[in-house]
Amino acid sequence: MTIKLYGAERCHKTQYYKKFLDDLNLKYKFLDVELNEEDAASLRNLYENRKLNFPTITIGEKRLRNPSDKDLKKWIEKLVCNSI
């Protein structure tokens, strides 16, 4: 199951989620939507309003917009741990 973190290096919330995922020793792909137009387009395609709603984390098909620690952990356990 692929985890993607859409965000920006300058964003403190993005940095928070990077640390959160690193602390859990999870492999994820960081997509900087300010530096890479393809990553920005991918993020826009996730939302009807076509805005850069970051940070957004995707786990497979599940999309989480600025989730709480509890919600993020729940979905990681449900989608990542069950796919191993």
Image: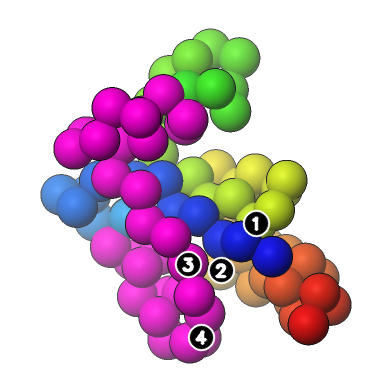
Q: Is residue 38 magenta?
A: yes
3 vs 4, front mark: 3
Q: Spatial distance from mark 1 to mark 2, Cα to Cα?
A: 15 Å
Is residue 38 rendered to the left or right of residue 4? left
Residue of label 1? 59
* Residue topped by disc 4: 24
Q: In which quarter of the image is the C terminus?
A: bottom right
52 to 49, vertically: above or below: below
- Between the C-alphas of marks 1 and 3, the distance is 9 Å
Q: Name the residue under label 3.
A: 28
The image shows residue 2 at horizontal and vertical percentages of 61, 61
Looking at the image, tell me whether mark 1 or mark 3 is earlier in sequence order. Answer: 3
Q: How crowded is mark 4: few (under 14 residues within 10 Å), some or many (20 or more)?
A: few
- The image shows residue 56 at horizontal and vertical percentages of 49, 45
* Residue at x 84% of width, y 77% of height: 82
Calculate the distance from the C-alpha at mark 3 to the C-alpha at mark 4.
11 Å
Range shown magenta = 15-43
Q: Can residue 74 be seen in this view?
A: no
Residue pointed to by mark 2: 69
What's the distance in space between the residues labelled 2 and 3, CA to CA? 16 Å
Residue 75 visible, this orientation: yes
